[in-house]
Image (cartoon, coloured by chain):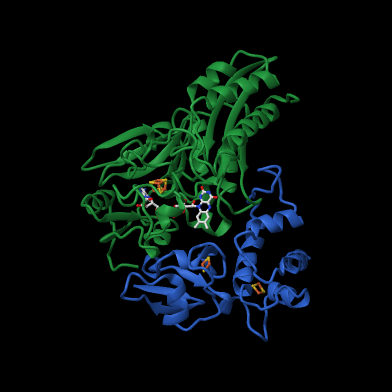
């Protein structure tokens, strides 16, 4: 690990000040940042310890929703009685990720900002436009098994690897961000992560000095909530494809279908056309297949990850069949 | 800045780069905690901080000012082993023993987590009382790898200890 200056932030404002200059980096649970610092992928000059700031609470909001502090551990969130009862897709997504030891340390903010698991990104002797802008992308013509099939660019085909944020995208949660002075802003989770485009080094919309303070969930909507994660082994592995679904029926018709996908893009993937297509229809194998056509109409494989296209199709159909009680 | 390890107080290191794992092993000589991967992937470095299990390789010692840590040395001794340690002996829950301190620290926390009804990915119902099936134990211990493949006996040992402690 490269030497760095360690500072413990006393107040939010202080954390924002210290992380504003280039080379300033906040640390919460440390499970992603320290891993990358050991590999010299991340080389901060100043490490700003935000872990003692009072942002670990989980509280009800006035409109019946729930606010999860940026420093709430993934464990605290997954075992919270209201998360288990009202937002089971979120508890399921968190529990499907990492291990108990890691979830005990991982935080809401850190989980949202975790970096890609692209092999070229984590090997500093390899070309990678995300780590070293302009050096090229090793994955596009290389080992791309875990890479994206939607929203890629000719600069980067990495995925956002997390699970929690996929559920948050299905739930249409909002990220609260504090900036310089008293400035705060709220960004829907669906808009928080960026597509690589021609700025592949940019994972999300955070500006220098901005700190995530929490995530708010809207009032619960009920319905059947499912998180289905397909991975190389049954536990302790990142998603190849995952689906978070909140589906409600009104008689024979689908009345709600909020879906988000992990492992397929540089962000948790949410396509509003899916809900337009599904809501108001009678569930059937054909309907689900058409939904997959819509989801995947721009999908592109890069050789090794071609399998993700049929995998996403089948996983979507299986989840919709399960949620609506349909035989396919 | 100080840290408490197995009820003894120590000064934290000056170099902020020192992981909690290196601090335990190198700085204060508690070599029971093992280093496998140093990247959060194997669980050999598992310790309890404030009663919660974590990977000591993925946290900085300086971030633990005022914290209380329990390592395998604080869980039991040769003459006074914990129920889990005894069960690991009785059920051959190890071969080379390298992963064992991490397995036992992890399983110690696991039993508390079950007592608190924390669900896992293997739980059918997020809110129901947890039945300590083999599947539950396997999922909950998935962060502790064993290169010798002693898994079957590790599961048996944890089951036996849980039973004994409930009796
Ligand atoms: C072996 C292994 C397996 C894993 N498996 C999975 C998995 O299956 N699924 C999954 O989803 N995840 C998985 N993870 C990743 C894990 O979930 C993340 O490492 C964790 O969520 C990061 O949270 P943290 O608090 O430790 O972040 P840190 O490491 O502290 O920070 C990560 C990044 O977020 C920034 N940051 C942290 N907090 C804030 C804030 N409040 N505001 C602004 N920026 C902030 C930091 O500056 C840093 O850039 C795995 C990790 C490991 C090591
Ligand atoms: S896919 Fe993105 S992260 Fe991976 S090598 Fe290419 S530019 Fe880097
Ligand atoms: S040494 Fe910490 S998890 Fe492997
Ligand atoms: S007993 Fe040898 S690694 Fe587990």
Rendered position, A228 above or below A234: above
* Figure quadrant, ligand 4: bottom right
Residue A304 drawn at (x, y percent)? 54, 44
Q: Give the residue at x 63% y 79%.
A: B76
Q: Give the residue at x 40% y 61%.
A: A34
User: Is A210 in front, or is A240?
Assistant: A240
Left or right of B67 in this view: B82: right
Rendered position, B16 above or below A73: below
Residue A126 drawn at (x, y percent)? 38, 56
User: Which color is chain B depicted in?
Assistant: blue
Residue A118 drawn at (x, y percent)? 45, 50
The chain coloured green carries which letter? A
Count of residue discs: 0
User: Is B164 in front, or is A273?
Assistant: A273
In the picture, the quarter occupied by the N terminus of chain B is: bottom left
Left or right of A82 in this view: A209: left
Q: Give the residue at x 71% y 54%.
A: B136
Quarter-of-image position of residue B88? bottom right
Residue A298 drawn at (x, y percent)? 48, 27
Residue A245 appears anywhere in the view:
yes
User: Is B149 in front, or is B53?
Assistant: B149
What is the residue that sits farthest to the bottom in this orientation?
B79
User: Is A87 in front, or is A32?
Assistant: A32
Residue A82 appears anywhere in the view:
no
């Amino acid at each position: 690990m490269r030497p760095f200056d360690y500072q413990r932030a006393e107040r939010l404002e202080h954390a924002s000040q210290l992380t504003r200059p280039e080379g300033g980096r906040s640390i919460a649970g440390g499970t992603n940042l320290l891993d990358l610092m050991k590999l010299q992928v991340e080389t901060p000059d100043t490490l700003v310890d935000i872990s003692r700031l009072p942002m670990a609470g989980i509280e009800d909001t006035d409109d019946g929703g729930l606010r999860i502090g940026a420093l709430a551990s993934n464990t605290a969130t997954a075992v919270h009685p209201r998360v288990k009862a009202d937002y089971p897709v979120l508890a399921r997504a968190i529990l499907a990720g990492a291990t108990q030891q890691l979830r005990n340390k991982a935080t809401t903010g850190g989980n949202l900002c975790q970096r890609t698991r692209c092999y070229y990104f984590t090997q500093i002797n390899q070309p990678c436009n995300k780590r070293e802008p302009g050096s090229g992308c090793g994955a596009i013509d290389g080992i791309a098994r875990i890479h994206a099939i939607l929203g890629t660019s000719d600069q980067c085909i990495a995925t956002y690897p997390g699970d929690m944020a996929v559920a948050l995208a299905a739930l249409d949660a909002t990220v609260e961000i504090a900036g310089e002075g008293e400035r705060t802003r709220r960004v829907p989770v669906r808009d928080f992560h960026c597509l690589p485009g021609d700025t592949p080094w940019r994972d999300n919309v955070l500006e220098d000095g901005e700190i995530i303070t929490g995530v708010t969930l809207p009032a619960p909507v009920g319905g059947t909530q499912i998180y289905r994660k397909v991975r190389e082994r049954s536990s302790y592995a990142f998603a190849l494809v995952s689906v978070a679904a909140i589906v409600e029926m009104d008689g024979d018709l689908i009345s709600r279908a909020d879906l988000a996908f992990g492992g397929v893009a540089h962000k948790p993937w949410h396509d509003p056309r899916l809900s337009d297509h599904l809501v108001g229809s009678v569930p059937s194998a054909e309907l689900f297949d058409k939904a997959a056509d819509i989801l995947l109409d721009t999908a592109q494989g890069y050789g090794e990850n071609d399998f993700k296209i049929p995998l996403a199709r089948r996983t979507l159909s299986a989840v919709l069949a399960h949620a609506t009680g349909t035989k396919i | 800045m100080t840290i408490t390890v197995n009820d003894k107080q120590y000064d934290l290191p000056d170099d902020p780069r020192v992981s909690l794992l290196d601090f335990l092993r190198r700085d204060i000589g508690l070599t029971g905690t093992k280093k496998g991967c140093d990247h959060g992937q194997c669980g050999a470095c598992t310790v309890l901080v404030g009663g919660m299990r974590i990977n000591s390789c993925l946290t900085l010692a300086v971030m633990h000012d005022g914290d209380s840590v329990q390592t395998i040395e604080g869980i039991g001794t040769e003459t006074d082993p914990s129920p889990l340690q005894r069960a690991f002996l009785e059920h051959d829950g190890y071969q080379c023993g390298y992963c064992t301190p991490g397995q036992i620290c992890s399983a110690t926390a696991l039993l508390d987590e079950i007592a608190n009804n924390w669900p896992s990915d293997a739980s059918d119902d997020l809110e129901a009382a947890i039945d300590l099936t083999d599947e539950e134990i396997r999922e909950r211990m998935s962060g502790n790898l064993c290169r010798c493949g002693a898994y079957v006996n590790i599961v048996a040992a944890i089951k036996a200890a849980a039973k004994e402690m409930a009796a």
